[in-house]
Image (cartoon, rainbow, N blue to C red):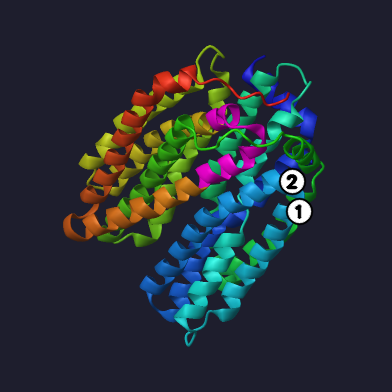
Amino acid sequence: MSAIAAYRALLRIVGPAYILVAFLGRIPLAMSQLGVLVLVSEATGRYGVGGAAAGILAVANAVGSPIFGSLSDRFGQRPVVLVQSLVGAAGLAGVVAVTDPEASQGAIFAMAALTGFAMPQVGPLARVRWRPITRDKGDQRRLVDAAFSYEGAADEASFVLGPATIGVLAIVAEPSGALLAAAGLLAVFGSWFALHPTSALVARRTLTGGGGAEPLWTGVFVVLVLAQLCIGMIFGSVQTGTTVLATAEGQAGLAGLIHAVLGIGSVIAGLAVTGLPERVLYATRMAVAAIGLLVLASPLLLVDSLPSLIGVIALLGFAVAPYMISNFALAGILVPVHKVSTAMTMLAGATGIGYALGAALAGRLADVNGHTAAFAVTVAAAGLAVVIALTSNKALREAVPVDQGY
């Protein structure tokens, strides 16, 4: 089955409505961090407060995601994601309500933490649905491969579109209007994703998945968590370095758009990955993509202008999605069926923690030595990804896939 045929088959199986709902359901999370940063910074006149609020939201989401993922494994996605969507939407509106020039920082931070903790990770949860969706639909291996490639591309697209949407709405409807729009999207499409008939397939699967004796924290799963931590550090340090260089060039407002270029290449590569033959194992793809990250990130150490930065970031993006797709696909194969939602959201949480760590470390170094020091964090994280991928390659290839019951 060709890549195009696989994508057509997936669309035929679930229908275009589900694809649209699952994509729009993940946009609010992509909008939330920048939306909170812009709103709080403008209202208080202090970028430090805005950055802290956005960081608190991101870390709280990284903490909450695996908790709700575990609840989804236990009770099914429908009730858990529905509650998350409604509470998360209310939280975004609550951030708007408590943020004003005289607002208490404690109240802002508390509302940001509650909001981040509650917001659902629609992308990872959508991945969980594809195996039961494609059961008895033909070449399941090829279909799931295509589905995970699409999901990786969709995640990257959402993190391009989300911040861009915030930027446009912040101009048209003020920052508060932008964040309220994110709340509305989450309430509608997050709830729709929760109630979609495919959620029932996951519920039947997880609730009948066995006694749960198999451990989640195996050696290979620890490898995947560390791998996602590395990619998160790459995201955070690239965004920080881009911001530092753009500010030094007097074009601070372009930082978000320049960083979005990373997602464009990633989307293209993510959609193309499904064209690889099945004999190229996910562990091999992970190792090759990690090496690609290091090779393509290294020129960042030589960048001294925005045009050269754009060129390097555009190429770097082509290694991002293949790396992440391989990690999530391995989790889907090697993790016990009744813990897949926990695993997927845990990987997403590790990415968020890595982002915060990479951004913080890059920011500290950039304060002393400028953008090159920030990008050194990117290269170091890519190097660590290579070490992890190569040293674990044999274990990942020889790991016995868990019986998923399909």
* Percent coordinates x, y for residue 228 in the rendering: 44, 40
Q: Can residue 321 be seen in the rendering of this structure?
A: no
Say which of 3 and 144 sits in front: 144
Percent position of residue 277, x then y? 55, 13
**Residue 86 position in % (x across, y down):** 71, 63
In the displayed structure, does residue 387 sit left or right of residue 32?
Answer: left
The residue under label 2 is: 76
> Magenta stretch: residue 134 in it?
no
- The type of residue carrying mark 2 is Gly
Residue segment shown in magenta: 329-348
Q: Is residue 217 above or below residue 357?
A: above
- The residue identified by callout 1 is 79
Q: Is residue 335 magenta?
A: yes
Rendered residue at 65%/26% (across/down): 144
Compute the Cα span from label 2 to label 1: 7 Å
Pointer 2 and pointer 1: residues touching (CB < 8 Å)? yes
Seen from the viewer's position, the closer of residues 311 and 321 is 321
Q: Is residue 188 above or below residue 90?
A: above
Establish if 24 lies above or below 299: below
Could one spot residue 372 in this view of the protein? yes
